[in-house]
């Protein structure tokens, strides 16, 4: 069986992170691919501060809309949870298109096109399955630019014109009418296919790995149809193994304390599955009520006792406790709430609310990678995935 690092002569895979947040998806990607994050892109100051704290020395490329990808170091893996506001079922449902926050997927696709990583990892909310996707109108195009009818000619028209192009007729006429646009997930998968990637996706609730909440997420794993396409256009970079058998060396600084990345990713092992047999005692039932069993299970999996779920404001009102939300996400204590980070409680809650449960992402990516490597039988995976285009 081919492993991700077989073709890389023992060096760790290089990871580029987009829409990085506090690094939840990155923890999973580093763990699953035994990789090392070499740059990240995060526009918001608060989560960028968290990421920089846990990945010291890794440069932040900043606003993704201003990056010249031709000047960025190539990587083996690009990962990112692009904004969900416009595809979320609790949002305005503006969809995946130009001018929307979720439409920043196009910037991620641009990075993939230029850098040509071997692997692509993307994450988003359940609404990706149902939200609409639109496309910008090409110059001179009189259609609305979403799914122009000539893109899928019916077979009879093609035969009459003696121009059969091998396109089967579509009884559902999906994509032929502007009133029936592509779904957001279909657009993302289509873009990846257009860029030369084979993609699989999986829908997974966090409760499947033992978390005491649902937090359903869509995970996409894509692999280049041409392995190591970026490497075809260049020779070995400084720090990469060349034809010599001598051990590779590199000049990247290794700050003390939080390196290497494997130390971070190793923390995911505690929350690796939801099948642990636990019991809720009387004290747990008094404190947590009907949630006692779920809380006890997550305490067992994470190795951490649940913090207090609420805090009392100065005006006597209760509000969610950031440390409790941090625990719900399966993060180490202080990952976002460490006072040295200087984030206010609202900033902490915002960062946590936009983040990824690392153990959930790792479980999804391992499942998808097994399918990609041909190990999965396709059975017992559930109706939500993995799917392939």
Image (spheres, rainbow, N blue to C red):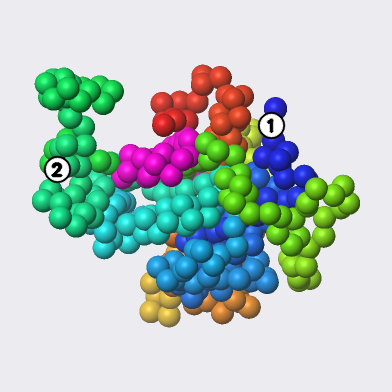
User: Magenta segment range?
Assistant: 184-211
x and y percent of residue 257 in the render? Answer: 77, 69
Q: Residue furthest right?
A: 246
Q: Quadrant of the N terminus?
A: top right
Residue at label 1?
Answer: 2
Residues at marks 2 and 1, CA–CA distance in whole angstroms: 43 Å
195 falls in the magenta region: yes
- Residue at image x 67%, y 40%? 4
Please count the marks in the image.
2
Please tell me in which quadrant of the rendered image residue 375 appears: top right
x and y percent of residue 188 in the render? Answer: 37, 45
**Camera-side residue: 238 or 14?**
238
**Camera-side residue: 32 or 388?**
388
Residue at label 2?
Answer: 178
Q: Is 300 situated left or right of 157 in this image?
A: right
- Residue at image x 20%, y 25%? 163
Mark 1: few/some/many CA within 10 Å (<14, 14-19, 20+): few
Above or below 316: residue 113: above
């Amino acid at each position: 069986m081919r492993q991700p690092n077989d073709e890389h002569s023992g060096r760790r895979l290089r990871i580029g992170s987009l829409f990085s947040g506090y690094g939840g998806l990155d923890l999973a990607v580093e763990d699953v691919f035994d990789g090392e994050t070499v740059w990240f892109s995060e526009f918001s100051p608060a989560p960028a501060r968290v990421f920089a704290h846990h990945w010291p020395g890794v440069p932040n490329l900043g606003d993704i809309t201003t990056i010249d990808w031709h000047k960025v170091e190539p990587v083996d893996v690009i990962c990112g949870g692009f904004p969900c506001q416009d595809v979320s079922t609790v949002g305005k449902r503006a969809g995946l298109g130009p001018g929307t926050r979720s439409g920043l997927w196009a910037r991620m696709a641009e990075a993939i096109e230029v850098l040509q990583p071997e692997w692509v990892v993307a994450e988003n909310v359940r609404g990706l399955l149902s939200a609409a996707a639109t496309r910008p109108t090409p110059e001179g195009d009189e259609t609305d630019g979403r799914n122009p009818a000539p893109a899928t000619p019916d077979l009879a028209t093609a035969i009459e014109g003696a121009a059969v192009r091998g396109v089967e007729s579509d009884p559902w006429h999906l994509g032929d009418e502007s009133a029936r646009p592509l779904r957001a997930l279909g657009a993302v998968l289509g873009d990846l296919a257009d860029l030369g990637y084979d993609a699989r996706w999986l829908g997974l609730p966090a409760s499947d790995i033992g978390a005491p909440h649902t937090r359903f997420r869509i995970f996409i794993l894509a692999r280049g149809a041409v392995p190591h396409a970026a490497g075809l256009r260049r020779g070995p970079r400084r720090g990469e193994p060349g034809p010599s058998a001598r051990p590779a060396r590199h000049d990247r600084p290794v700050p003390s304390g939080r390196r290497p990345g494997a130390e971070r990713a190793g923390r995911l092992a505690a929350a690796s599955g939801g099948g642990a047999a636990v019991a809720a005692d009387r004290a747990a039932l008094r404190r947590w009520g009907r949630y006692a069993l779920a809380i006890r299970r997550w305490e067992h999996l994470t190795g951490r006792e649940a913090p207090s779920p609420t805090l009392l404001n100065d005006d006597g009102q209760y509000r969610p406790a950031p440390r409790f939300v941090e625990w719900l996400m399966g993060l180490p204590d202080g990952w976002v709430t460490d006072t040295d980070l200087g984030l206010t409680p609202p900033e902490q809650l915002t960062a946590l609310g936009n983040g990824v449960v690392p153990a959930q992402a790792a479980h999804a990516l391992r499942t998808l990678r097994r399918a990609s490597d041909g190990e999965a039988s396709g059975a017992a995976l559930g109706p939500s995935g993995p799917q392939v285009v």
